Image: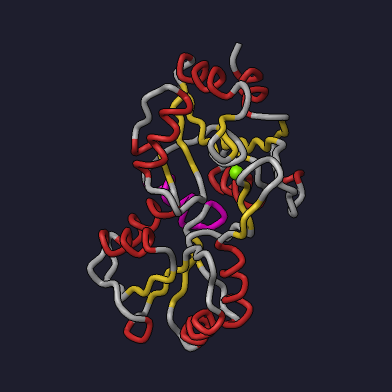
Amino acid sequence: MKTLATDLDGTLYLDDVLIKGVESAYKSLILDNYKIFHTTNNSSQSTDVLAKKLSNLLNVDIDLSSIVTPLVVLKEYLSNKKLSIFVYGSKDVKDFVSSISNTVTKLEDSNFIIMGRVESPSESELDLIAESIKSGKEGATLNKDLTYPISESEFKPGNGQIAKYIESKSQKELQSFGKEGELYSQYFLNKNIEVDYVIGDRVDTDIMFGNKLGATSILVESSIDNFMSEDFADSKFTDFPTFVSSIIN
Ligand SMILES: [Mg+2]
């Protein structure tokens, strides 16, 4: 059995629309006995919601444990630690962290700060967080994506904008639970999951993740402009279906 870890946004679908040819390409991988992991830096949707979305779009059953999001990696990370956690993020992210840890607290009582995406960040709150991190509290972000695609030509600002701001104000580097961080690839390594191929549309996240795992990294062309060199990828393909037909006879 071979294992492939695929990105979701911009690789399998854009917004709520499957990219052309993905359904039959996906099914041919299953028929060819591939184990597929669904990887994403999206931390605003739970694994249940993502499984339902994938299953509706692809018309297949999706195993929850095949979905790896920054929240899944965060849960694993917190599982054997005693931290007092402050969460800066949406209500969903706050609720999620509260559900996996009973040590969520106020900023002043915390020693670990988790940052997620919020619709309209308040500069004064961010400055307080940056100050806390500068003076020694540990800080981490759910991912460092500067933007994420919502259609072929539209983007929304991502977590990375906030992370960048905090890093520059605090002069400290934030850990990331996203694909670009060490903890994400560590999740696979700790579980002894050997991945043959990692496919995605972003060099800074997907390709870096693939290279950290020692997998063959596959870059697909998509709606985003990569600011890192495409040469980091082992191979380049137009899209997911084109890559799949190259590995399946
Ligand atoms: Mg993507």
Query: Along the horizontal axis of the image, is 187 left or right of 248?
Result: left
Magenta stretch, main secondary structure class:
helix
Quarter of the image holding residue 25? top right
Identify the residue shown where x is 30% and y is 77%: 105
Which quarter of the figure is the C terminus placed in?
Answer: top right
Q: Is residue 225 above or below residue 112?
A: above
Report the residue at 57% width, 82% height from top: 170
Question: What segment is highlighted magenta in the picture?
Answer: 179-190
As drawn, is 176 to the left or to the right of 168?
left
Within the displayed image, which quadrant is ligand 1 positioned in?
Answer: top right
The answer to whether residue 22 is seen in the rendering is yes
- Across and down, in percent, residue 78 comes to 32, 62
Q: Is residue 204 magenta?
A: no
Q: Residue furthest left?
A: 102
- Residue in the foreground of this view, choosing between 219 and 97: 97
Give the position of the N terminus as an image quadrant. Answer: top left
The colour scheme used here is secondary structure
Image position of 101 with respect to 203: above or below: below
Viewer-side residue, 62 vs 188: 62
Counting from the top left corner in percent of width and height, residue 248 is at 59, 15
Residue 233, located in which quarter of the rendered image?
top right
Where's residue 154, x and y in %? Answer: 68, 48
Measured from the top left, where is residue 129 in percent x and y?
48, 81
Labels in figure, total = 0
Q: Quadrant of residue 146?
A: bottom right
Give the residue at the far top of this rendering. Answer: 249
Tell me what residue is drawn at x 37 percent, y 44 percent.
47
Residue 199 visible to an observer of this rendering? no
- Left or right of 7, for residue 243: right
